Amino acid sequence: MGSYGKDIVCAAVSVLALNAVNSIEKFTDDELKIESDKETGFLKGIFEKVPSDKSELLLDSLTFGLSNIASTYPKNLSLEIKED
C-alpha cells in the first residue's frame, strides 16, 4: 500500500484521463492516436490534425481537474503541461 492519498490520486487521474480520451473519441470527429503502458500508467494522445474547439474544451477540462488534484495532493501529483 502506498502513502496516504496515493491510491485515490491514481484512481482520480485515471478516470479523468480515460474520460477525456473517450469523450474526444465519442463527441468529436478528431482523430486521436493513443500510446499507453498499463504497467507504468503512461498515457499519451496525439492528434492527427489541429484539435477542434470541442477537443480543446475537453483537454481544458482535463487540465482543470488534474490541476485541482495536484493542488490538493502535491506530494502525490505534479503537473507539467507540454504542447508540441
Image (tube, rainbow, N blue to C red):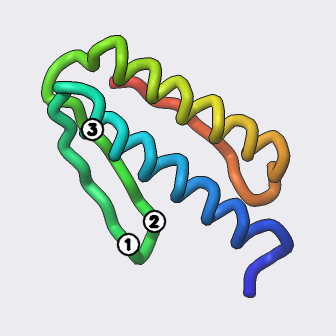
**Which residue is located at x 19 percent, y 27 percent?**
30
For this orientation, the residue located farthest to the front is 27
In the shown orientation, is residue 29 left or right of residue 2? Answer: left
Q: Which mark is residue 41?
A: 2
Mark 2 to mark 3 CA distance (whole Å):
22 Å
At mark 1, the secondary structure is loop
Looking at the rendered image, the quarter that the C terminus falls into is top left
Compared to 28, does 26 lie above or below?
Answer: below
Compared to 46, does 10 lie above or below?
Answer: below
Which amino acid, mark 1?
Answer: Lys
Instruction: Please tell me in which quadrant of the rendered image residue 79 appears.
Output: top right
What is the x, y in percent for residue 13?
A: 59, 54
Q: Which residue is mark 1?
A: 38
Which numbered disc, 2 or 3, marks the residue closer to the eye?
A: 3
In the shown orientation, is residue 44 left or right of residue 74? Answer: left
| Marks 2 and 1 close (CB-CB < 8 Å) | yes
Which tag, 3 or 1, sits closer to the chain's start? 3
Q: Residues within 10 Å of mark 1 (few under 14, many from 20)?
A: few
